[in-house]
Image (spheres, helix red, strand yellow):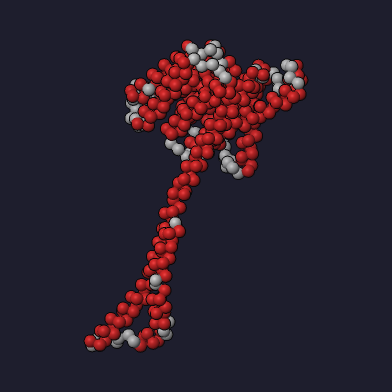
Amino acid sequence: MQSARGTVAQRCSLLSPRIAHIAPRVAQPSSVRLQRQPQLLQPVSQQQQVAAAGVSSSRQSSDEPRASSVVCHAAAADAAASDDKPVGKVAGLVGLGALFAGWYLANIYFNIFNKTLLKTFPYPLSITNIQFAIGIGLSCLFWLTGVVKRPQLDAKTIASVYPLAIIHVLGNVLTNVSLGKVAVSFTHTVKAMEPFFSVIMSAIFLGDVPPVPVLVTLIPIVGGVIMASLSETTFNWTGFLAAMFSNITFQSRNVLSKKFMISKGALDNMNLFQVITIMAFFMLLPVSILIEGLPILPHNLAAAGLDSAAQADLFRRLLSAGICFHGYQQLSYMILSRVTPVTHSIGNCVKRVVVIVASVIAFQNPMSTQNAMGTALAMFGVFLYSQAKRKYKGNKPKAA
């Protein structure tokens, strides 16, 4: 950038003597310049033509430094802009990479904290609702500080969001039930079947049937999950079915978002998640108390054999899991606002692989060769599905 500006500056400096030479002529009084103008409707002699040519040449010369000065400034601006564009592009890529890294890390720690919590505090409904409560606190903080613009809600928008909040409750409760019953790696392997249920739900409720190449990519997904399930050492039907129904609920949420046509002017994606979180908390609270009571109270924890140190550790893990839960959801929406849905889907597939590997390392879960191959096959199928969706986008036949 310095070399480009230096070159421009050298060119501009060459014009300085010409500007100084012409300045006295330009500074002459207007009366003098008027006297030198030829009279109209009079014969023009050869001398007068030469004089007129000289005046024209001087005017052209006086205009030339101005035009050259403008060119100098424009060239300098272009040189600076051309040098700043790569810097801005690199900064954008670095920022996007930081968002992806934060998304993955928050999801990894959420799953690890959740798994350890469910081992010592086996109350999935209470844990889910505490995470919703922490999300409410963070949402209010974002709104008060102006990080996220506060939404303008009306009765119609709330009525549209209500079914999504119910599904949000079911999906998160079922995920926590599954995490409490089977290994984290197995839960995420089963949840890789999201594309399979997305195709089914879209065909039933929206009449959208993808082309055959997209349907073919579902075969390795289903086959990989079956292969991993048959060799999973922590397999049990409660954990498996909870993960399966979690897929169904979350995919139906995506379909219902299109079906109910929520106004994007009233709620963007981040505000939609925050409003759903608030509604989900109040929906789940009475159900949680009815089924599990209030196990988070200190005397109930003491009765469960947790001393003051263990209770403090439990509260720290609950707070950390809640922050990670809300954080990775918000980061997911921030990334989705910057990239295409296909790119986001591929990133989500990579995230599952990262979470599976991290959980195996953290919990030292044994994985057989068949289990590892099934997991890899399912994840590869999800990648193929994302690529096929991008290639055949807008080429979908309607269901009869």
Among all residues in the image, which is located at the extreme front? 3
Quarter occupied by the C terminus: top left
Q: Residue at x 34, y 76 (%)?
A: 61
Which of 186/293 is in front?
186
Establish if 185 lies above or below 269: above
Residue 79, placed above or below residue 227: below
Return the residue nearer the eye: 1 or 73. 1
Decide: is 274 above or below 91: above
User: Is residue 158 visible in this depiction of the protein?
Assistant: no
x then y, percent, for residue 38: 30, 86
Q: Residue at x 44, y 49 (%)?
A: 86
Q: Is residue 344 above or below residue 37?
A: above
**Residue 23 coordinates in the image, percent (x, y):** 41, 79
Query: How many numbered discs, if any?
Result: 0
Of 277 and 235, which appears nearest the observer? 235
Q: For residue 152, which quarter of the picture? A: top right
> Residue 141: which quarter of the image?
top right
Q: Position of residue 71 (x, y in %)?
A: 38, 65
Could you say where residue 308 lies in the image, as x and y percent from the top left? 76, 24
Asked if one can make out residue 340 in the rendered structure from this viewpoint, the answer is yes
Identify which residue is drawn at 52% across, 34% down: 332
What quarter of the picture does the N terminus occupy? bottom left
